[in-house]
Amino acid sequence: MHLQFNRSRSQLLLFTEAEDSLWLNVIDRQAMECRQRILIGVWEKDDWMDVFSYPGFMSVVVESKETPRLILLCDEEERGIWRMEMTAELAWQGQEGLQTCFVQSGAQMAYDGRRLAVAQWSRNYATDMDLMICQEGGVVFYGRYRRQGEYQSQHYNYRQEVRPQDDGENGLQLKWAES
């Protein structure tokens, strides 16, 4: 279903589906042996997933017919021993009722040992930014920061959106303040 290296490239991280469950198989790259197998959660036929990797942790986002969920796995000292740290349903009780929160490609994440912050450019509004804070169980904060992003061109007499530049390295960045 999904295969990637860990950040040091010493392990293959293979996500598989078996018996209606999603599994992470941690394979030692040198010996080509499975060193760890972790049950991530329920997996249904029409589900899909995305993996976001950062130093010391990775987030697995599972989209399903039900509420999407985020599973956080940690390898804090980057020793190659993974553990499940948090599972959060991606729904927010907003003014309009229960709203589903989505995590998309290009999202940036920061984990402080208790909470996961997720920042991303909004899906529907290119210059807006969404910020979500998750902890065990679910979303505890969700906000959309709106910016003015439209201008009238002097030369071509048409409206054009000003879009953020996000090249993956110099774009959106996120970290927790030192306490």
Image (tube, rainbow, N blue to C red):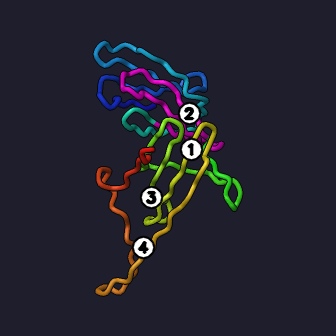
Question: Where is mark 1, residue-wise?
Answer: 134
Query: Dot 2: within a 10 Å radius of its alpha carbon, few (fewer than 14), some, or many (20 or more) residues?
Result: many
- Sooner in the amino-acid sequence: mark 3 or mark 1: 3
Going from N to C along the chain, the mark reached first, 4 or 3, is 3
Residue beneath label 3, please?
121
Q: Disc 4 to disc 3, how far (Cα)?
A: 13 Å
Specify whether 157 is left or right of 118: left
Quadrant of the rendered structure where residue 82 is? top left
Residue 44 against residue 27 in the figure, above or below = below
Relative side of 162 to 15, left or right = left
Front position among marks 4 and 2: 2
Residue appearing at x 51%, y 54% in the figure: 131
The alpha-carbon separation of the residues under discs 1 and 4 comes to: 28 Å
Task: Magenta stretch: give its range.
Answer: 59-88
Residues at discs 2 and 1 in contact (Cβ within 8 Å): yes
Counting from the top left corner in percent of width and height, residue 140 is at 61, 48
Q: Quickly name the residue at label 4.
A: 149
> Which element is circle 1 on?
strand
Q: Distance from label 3 to label 1 (Cα)?
A: 17 Å
Q: Position of residue 176 (x, y in %)?
A: 44, 46
**Taking 132 as reference, is 7 above or below it?**
above
Q: Which amino acid type corresponds to the residue marked 3 in the rendered image?
A: Trp
In the foreground, 65 or 86: 86
Q: Is residue 86 magenta?
A: yes
- Reading the image, the residue beneath label 2 is 86
The residue drawn where x is 69% and y is 61% is 95
**Real-space Cα separation, disc 2 to disc 1, in angstroms:** 9 Å
Q: Residues within 10 Å of mark 1 (few under 14, many from 20)?
A: many
